Amino acid sequence: MAVKKRLFTGLQPSGQLHLGNYFGALKPFLDTYQEYDSFLMVADYHSLTSLKNPTELRANVVEVVRAYLALGVEPSKTVIFKQSDVPEHTELAWIFDCLVSVQFLIQGHAYKDKVAKGLEPNAGLFTYPMLMAADILLYDTDMVPVGQDQRQHIEYAREAAAKFNITFGQTFKEPQEKISDDVAVVPGIDGQKMSKSYGNTVPLFGSREEIAKAVMGIVTDSSGERPENVYAIHKLIKSEEELAGLYEEKKGKYKDLKEALIEDLDAFIAPMREKRTAITDEEVKRVLTEGAAKAKAFAAAKMTDVRKKVGVTI
């Protein structure tokens, strides 16, 4: 029997989940995780670069796991765990920080973009790629599903692996990114990438009223007969063939097209919304406890090797 390749992915618990999270990270994982030996991490330490409210963070962690379970992820077929439950992540990140240069990190597109958008340029945000590299490399990962805008982070992980291997001997695999080109960057209601930090999201488990409010707020381009920002979101849940007739019939009728999008989004989201409400906090905590034990066993073995190679084990 062939050994499965390992897939690793994670999601920050930094706010309400939205369609961008679903199509950019959740769905790619759902579509492929059973084909791999899969690890699914809740990146709570990463979220500290922007989220400073402990009560909100705790609630968000539970909601992220509840979301994965509601979407159909089976804990028996993947390792679901919380980043902070495995201290080897931050330990390895420090070692990588000591291998790469400031000049190397300052090239990070995500850092520049977030600072340009007004996010505080704290040191954690600056060294974020090395913690992400540690997340990935600890588990001998082969494949990481990411959006197009996250490709550089995987390149950074490969660079961290290569630098360590050259300096201390062969230790880490160099992972590959898995990008779905058709939905690599999910558009928000303003046409930019959908992001909590931009305030341009459609909530993944939103009520019909919340969906309607988001959709009616979509910025429309009055220069053409088809509202491109409406269409860009609509084609995430329906094929272009299915939409062709509607957008031809309602040409120039932006309000009608938004109302059609509300109907289709609510029909798409409602089953997930209902399943999510049935999952208890206790179930989430049990899944995280079991996942942490599995992840720690693997990470601890890897770090035993790393410590020997860097010389901190006497």
Image: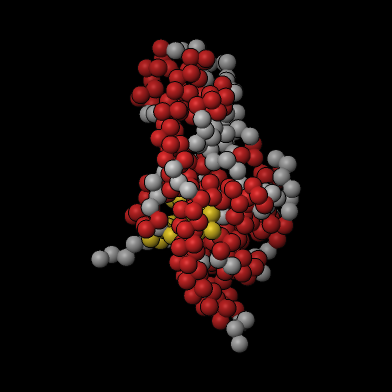
Q: Residue at x 66, y 58 (%)?
A: 127
In this view, which residue lies farthest toward the bottom?
314
Give left or right: position of 153 versus 270: right
Up-down: is 22 above or below 95?
above
x%, y% of residue 220?
57, 20
Quarter location, residue 44: bottom right
Give left or right: position of 279 versus 62: left
Looking at this view, is 12 or 75 the one in front?
75
Q: Residue at x 59, y 48 (%)?
A: 59
Up-down: is 307 above or below 250?
below
x%, y% of residue 41?
51, 56
Is residue 232 something that shows in the picture?
Answer: no
Is residue 274 something that shows in the picture?
Answer: yes
Q: Residue at x 40, y 50 (%)?
A: 73
Quarter location, residue 84: bottom right
x%, y% of residue 225?
50, 14
